Amino acid sequence: MTKTILVTGSTDGIGLLTAQKLASAGHTILLHGRSDAKLEAAAAKVGGDVETYAADLSDLSAVRQLAQDVRSKHDQLDVLINNAGVLKAPDPVLGNGQDIRFVVNTLAPYLLTELLLPIIPATGRVVNLSSAAQAPVNVAAIQGNVPLTDMDAYAQSKLAITIWTREWANTLPDGPVMIAVNPGSLLASKMVKDGFGVAGNDLSIGADILVDAALGARFAEASGAYFDNDSGRFANPHASALDAKHANDVMTTLKDTLSQTG
Ligand SMILES: NC(=O)c1ccc[n+]([C@@H]2O[C@H](COP(=O)([O-])OP(=O)(O)OC[C@H]3O[C@@H](n4cnc5c(N)ncnc54)[C@H](OP(=O)(O)O)[C@@H]3O)[C@@H](O)[C@H]2O)c1
C-alpha cells in the first residue's frame, strides 16, 4: 500500500536520496526545504507524486505554518521523517539568543511532530535523525545565551532529540511508532564535507536505513528505540539518555521553551 511521507530537509544529502528511494517505490512524498530553488530542483530529481513545502526550521513560526500547510492538504500522514539538521552555520546564534542546532535539530522536529500527530495514524511512524555524536545536554543552552562550540551544540541537540523520541514514545503505547536513528557516520553529504572536510561514505547507507525505519517490519515494534546504523543494530543511546533525571530535565526544558515561543 502506498503511503504519504513527509521528509524534512529533503533538498540535499540523506533526505533527498531517501525521498528519491521512497518516491520510486510509489509513495506520495512531501518534500521540505528552506530554499524554493532547491525544492524545485529536488522535485525534478525525485519525480513521481511529490509536493513541496518551504519553511526555515530555525524559525518556529515557520514550523507552525509548515504543519498548517501540510494539514490543509492532507487528512492523513503515514510517516514523518524529521531529517533536516544543521552542524555548522554562518550565524549559529539566532536573534533571540538560541543556538540554531537546538532549534533546527531538536525543537523544530518536536513542534512539527506535535502539530502533525493528530493526522498520523496509530500505525504511522515518526523517524527522528540522531547521530553517533551525542553529549549530555546543558539544559540552559536549549533556552539560549550559552556559548557552545559547533560540535558540542550538535552533539547535545542530537542527544536531546534521542531523549524526546524515547520519552514521548513511552507515552504512546498504541502508536504511532517513534524511533531515533543514527543513519551512519561520515556519510557523503554537504554537512560532512563542510564540517569535517572529508568526502564521506555512500549516502545510500543512510537513505536505506531511513526507508527501513519508515516502512520496514523490524521497526514496527521498536517504538522508543535507538537504531545505531554504525553497528547495524538497535543499541542504547548515550548513557545520559537513560538517566531518568537528565531525561526529565530535558523534556521539561523542551516543553517550557516551546511554550514560551507561543
Ligand atoms: N551525513 C552524516 O554522516 C550524518 C551522520 C549522522 C546524522 N546525520 C543527520 O542526518 C540528517 C541529514 O543530514 P545530511 O548529512 O544529509 O546533511 P545535509 O546534506 O546538509 O542536509 C540537511 C538538510 O536539512 C536542511 N536544513 C538545514 N537547515 C535547515 C533549516 N534551517 N530549515 C530547513 N531545512 C534545513 C538542508 O537544507 P538546504 O539544502 O537548504 O541546506 C538539507 O535539506 C541531519 O539531521 C544530520 O544531523 C548525518
Image: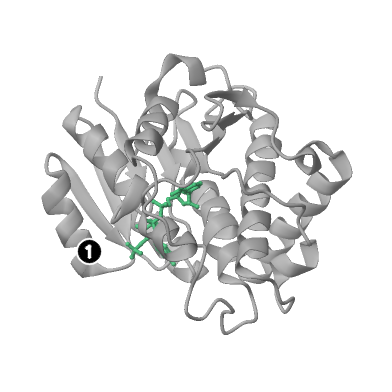
Identify residue for label 1: 38
- Crowding at dot 1, Cα within 10 Å, few <14 / some 14-19 / many 20+, comes out as some
Point out the residue furthest to the front here.
Answer: 198
| Looking at the image, residue 39 lies above or below residue 240 | below
Q: Residue at x 62, y 62 (%)?
A: 151
Residue 252: percent from left, percent from top: 78, 54
**Residue 65 position within the rendered picture, expressed as x and y whole percent measured from the top left:** 40, 64
Labels in figure, total: 1
Q: Quadrant of the C terminus?
A: bottom right
Q: Does the Cβ of the disc 1 residue fall within 8 Å of ligand 1?
A: yes
Left or right: 212 as drawn, with respect to 51? right
Q: Nearer the viewer, residue 93 or 124?
A: 93
Mark 1 residue element: helix
Q: Is residue 233 visible?
A: yes
Q: Residue 83: image x %, image y %?
A: 44, 48
Left or right: 7 as drawn, with respect to 259 = left
Q: Label 1 is placed on what type of residue?
A: Lys
- Taking the spot 28% from the left edge, 68% from the top edge, the residue there is 35
Q: Is residue 125 above or below residue 153?
A: above
Q: Is residue 119 above or below residue 93?
A: above
Any part of residue 73 in sight: no
Q: In which quadrant of the rendered image does the N terminus lie?
A: top left
Q: Relative to 29, say whether 24 is above or below.
A: above
- Residue 118 pos. (x, y %): 48, 40
Tell me the quadrant of ligand 1: bottom left
Position of residue 23 in the picture relative to residue 100 (left or right)? left
Depth order, front residue of 147/46 = 147
